[in-house]
Image (tube, rainbow, N blue to C red):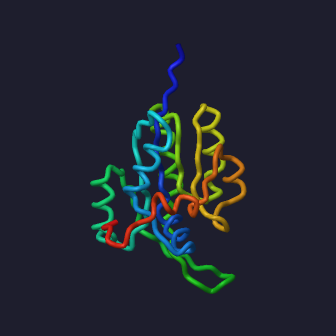
Amino acid sequence: MTITSNRLSIFVDGNNMFYAQQKNGWFFDPRRVLEYFAHEQPETTLINAFWYTGLKDQQDQRGFRDALISLGYTVRTKILKEYYDDSSGRYSQKANLDIEIVVDMFNTVDQYDRVVLFSGDGDFERAIELLRSKNTHITVVSTEGMIARELRNATDRYIDLNDLRGKIEKAEASQC
């Protein structure tokens, strides 16, 4: 008898998803994300969920981070760094949490069979290829115009964020 396991881990690139949601004009509820993916397939066991975000300072987004933790997310943060773009003459801020996401993916790889990655960042292409070689099923959630072609091609399944809107959208009165 073959036992098929359906252990799931969720990784949310918070800054990438903030811009994707802003582009789409609606925001998702982190609680509904967990509920949806934990029940999307029969006998799914949600093993863990990680949320990565850049902060202006240590107190930035404190209430939101506390809410995520109370929902069961492991929250990883980094202070934003400012970068100057010579070509545009503009400053931008980035946290660069990609390596933390990849480290957590590989550090917990023996705990799950499926991954849902909320990001459109092409930097994850190689990590996704390596996880797939370990028989891990990878779903990437992003939005058109913000998903790198390399990432979309490397994944087992791509879901456009807008296709999930009715299932994961934040209600106006929701706290996070």
Quadrant of the rendering where the C terminus is positioned: bottom left
Say above or below: 47 vs 125: above
71 or 11: which is nearer to us?
71
40 or 107: which is nearer to us?
40
119 or 89: which is nearer to us?
119
Total count of labels? 0
Hey, which quadrant is residue 132 in on the image? top right
Determine the residue located farthest toward the bottom in the rendered image: 89
15 or 139: which is nearer to us?
139
Q: Is residue 71 left or right of residue 39?
A: left
Residue located at (54% from left, 17% from top)? 2
Residue located at (68% from left, 60% from top)? 148
Determine the residue located farthest toward the front in the rendered image: 166
Say above or below: 84 vs 109: below
Residue located at (41% from left, 48% from top)? 49
Determine the residue located farthest toward the top in the rendered image: 1
Say above or below: 22 vs 11: below
Say above or below: 63 vs 35: below
Q: Is residue 55 left or right of residue 4?
A: left
Q: Residue 32: give x, y in percent of width and height.
A: 40, 56
Residue located at (66% from left, 84% from top)? 88
Q: Residue 168: give x, y in percent of width and height.
A: 45, 59
Q: Residue 159: give x, y in percent of width and height.
A: 60, 54
Q: Residue 77: give x, y in percent of width and height.
A: 39, 60
